[in-house]
Amino acid sequence: MPRSRTLPAELDPSARQLVARLRLLKDHSELTMRQLAVKTGYSAKSWERYLGGTSLPPREAVEALAGITGTDPVPLLALHEIAIDSRDDRRARPAAQRQNEQREREGEQSTSTTTPHPGPPAAATARMPPRATGPAPGRFPHLALTAGIAALVVALSAALLLMVRLDDEAGRAAVTASPRATVTSPPPSYTCRISRLDGRWSAGINKGRDTEIVYGATGADVAEAQCLLRRAGISPGGIDGMFGPLTLRAVKTFQERAGLTVDGMLGPRSWKALRG
């Protein structure tokens, strides 16, 4: 989606910071919405809502975007948690206000029931203490919580902006030191060349290695596994060498079908079953 598209005015500040950071990661990766959907397992329509600020992304979507862009997910997940808490707080706030108003009305009724009949004006004035005009009970803790969340959002925003600035400066320094180097290198492409060697299936990508790989891994070993999963009739989502959500789902499906322990990791037994 274009970066120039404005976010909804009613968007919470913490959610606005999260969306801005996700937009920046997407722009730096130069991925289209369709490519983003393939690599993360979330549809292009979902990413349009997430990056447009009309819907908060789930935690898994934030982790997936951080994984494919090589970004530390911890600051993003912290900001995501604050945004979720702020949203829940806004939803719960009207109910809390109604409870405070109900308690105030009950207090007024109790006072009117126990107050004696009015006498002379001077006596009534002496007996009736002035009503407090301060804020209703329970509001100060809420204000303190809101102030704490706002301070944390500001601190995280400053840290994120500093990280982006350092990344940009490092990129400019690399271009200055090596003028002929490209700004971004295209991801490696893999081609499945399925064959049977010595009674074992091979895709011709990782020279027959059975290296143990887990979620988040990248490279030729992952691409080899993706080719063999596709040969077994299970789609890993693409042969891109990235162990993302779709590949994880394909591995678990294969393990369940082969009667193996369904742990989502490709170890010796899973490789043996894949290679036949």
Image: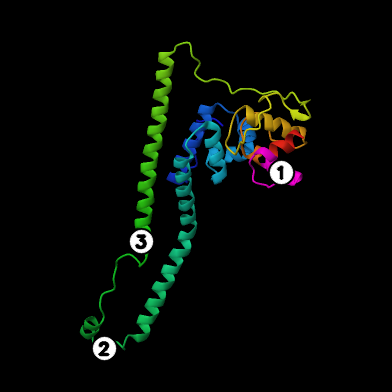
Q: Report if residue 239 is visible in the image.
A: no
Within 10 Å of disc 3 (Cα), the crowding (few <14, some 14-19, many 20+) is few
Q: Amino acid at mark 1?
A: Gln
Q: Quadrant of residue 141?
A: bottom left
Region in magenta: 249-269
SS for callout 2: loop
Left or right side of 103 for 47: right
Instruction: Check residue 141 in the rendering and tell me which mark sits there, or answer none.
Output: 3
Label located before the other in sequence (1 or 3)? 3
The foreground one among 273 and 153 is 273
SS for callout 3: helix
Label located before the other in sequence (2 or 1)? 2
Q: What is the spatial separation of the Cα atoms under label 2 and label 1, in whole angstroms?
A: 86 Å
Residue 236: where, in percent of width, then height? 69, 35
Viewer-side label of 2, 3: 3
Residue 154: where, in percent of width, then height? 36, 43
Instruction: Check residue 119 in the rendering and tell me which mark sits there, or answer none.
Output: 2
Q: Residue at x 58, y 34 (%)?
A: 217
Within 10 Å of disc 1 (Cα), the crowding (few <14, some 14-19, many 20+) is many
Q: Residue furthest front?
A: 198
Q: Residue at x 38, y 81 (%)?
A: 110
SS for callout 1: helix
Q: Give the number of marks.
A: 3
Residue 165: where, in percent of width, then height? 39, 29
Scheme of image coloration:
rainbow
The foreground one among 158 and 51 is 158
In the rendered image, which quarter contains the C terminus?
A: top right
Picture layout, residue 227 above or below residue 132? above
Question: Where does label 1 land, which residue?
Answer: 255
